[in-house]
Amino acid sequence: LKKGADAARGDDTSSLKELVAAWVNQEFRPSPLIKPDDKHSRGFASDVCGKLLCPAEWDWDENRVRAGIRDRTTDYIVSENSWPLFMYEKYKVDRDKLEEGFLKSKLLVLAFKAIFTSPSSAKEADGDGDGADILENNRHAQRKSEQAKVKTCVTSIISMKKVTPRAIAYIVCQVHFALSCVSSWRTVDGDFDYELFWNNVVDYFEVVPGPVTKRRVDKLLEWWTR
């Protein structure tokens, strides 16, 4: 089972390596463009990938922040205990309201579609926030597949009826890795621990301090599933 899981994760990692590069290039038009077959020019060495990986509470556009992260100074250590900007709708954040737009970015929606439905279904995502309709688009794709033989999507195989916190956490980790400069999967990348990061995302949904937070995370899961 572990071998199968590792192989599936490897396939997803390989697919998103190229797809995330294409999506970032299309969205941000960086110069030079992110190469789909190369990871070494990504991560914090890249202005666009660095901005997306930057903890949301910091402003990547400030010279001291960029330099501090790149030099790994004690004030700017990037760990699994911060939410990167790529997790936010339109890749923008109100630092006084860090919950707004959280986990609603276009990159996450596209990656979820590519992994759990099919890469072609990711093309149907029309932006951040509104228009996600992830599982509904999958059901539409299934109806079309009755007339054309296509590879069965993951959501059908595992009978996914709704988007789960663990599925979201998996995609968040995969996108983070795709934006990084690390060429092969590892649980710990410098100061960043992917296993703890995955747990943090799941805990955001499952370890809630009260009814107000519970309603907020339930609403977010409904947004993903609708």
Image (cartoon, rainbow, N blue to C red):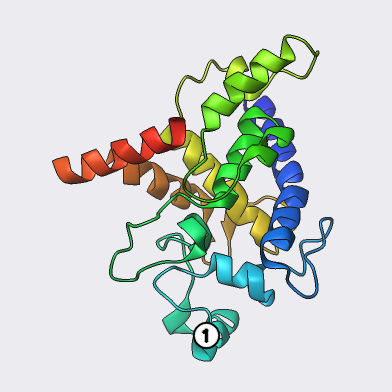
> x%, y% of residue 31?
77, 75
Left or right placement of residue 15 versus residue 191 in this view: right
Q: Is residue 50 left or right of residue 24?
A: left
Where residue 80 sits, quadrant-wise, is: bottom left
Q: Nearer the viewer, residue 86 or 12?
A: 86
Left or right for 99, reference 156? left
Q: For the N terminus, which image quadrant?
A: top right
The quadrant the C terminus occupies is top left
List x then y, in percent, for residue 29. 73, 68
Residue at 53% x, 41% y: name it: 170
Instruction: Looking at this view, name the residue that lies furthest to the bottom.
Output: 64
What is the three-letter code of the residue carrying label 1? Answer: Gly
How far across and down, in percent of the image, does residue 87 sit? 49, 55
**Image: 37 above or below 33:** above
Residue at figure coordinates x 30%, y 41% from the top left:
217
Percent from the top left, x then y, of residue 32?
A: 80, 74
Look at 73% across and 71% down and name the residue there: 30
Q: Dot 1 lies on which element?
A: helix
Residue 120 in view: yes
85 or 203: nearer the eye?
85
The quarter holding residue 75 reads bottom left
| Residue 210 can be seen in this image | no
How many numbered marks appear? 1
**Quarter of the figure with residue 44:** bottom right
Q: Residues within 10 Å of mark 1 (few under 14, many from 20)?
A: some
Left or right, 2 with reference to 11? left
Residue, far top: 146
Identity of the residue drawn at 31% across and 38% down: 219
Residue at numbered disc 1: 68
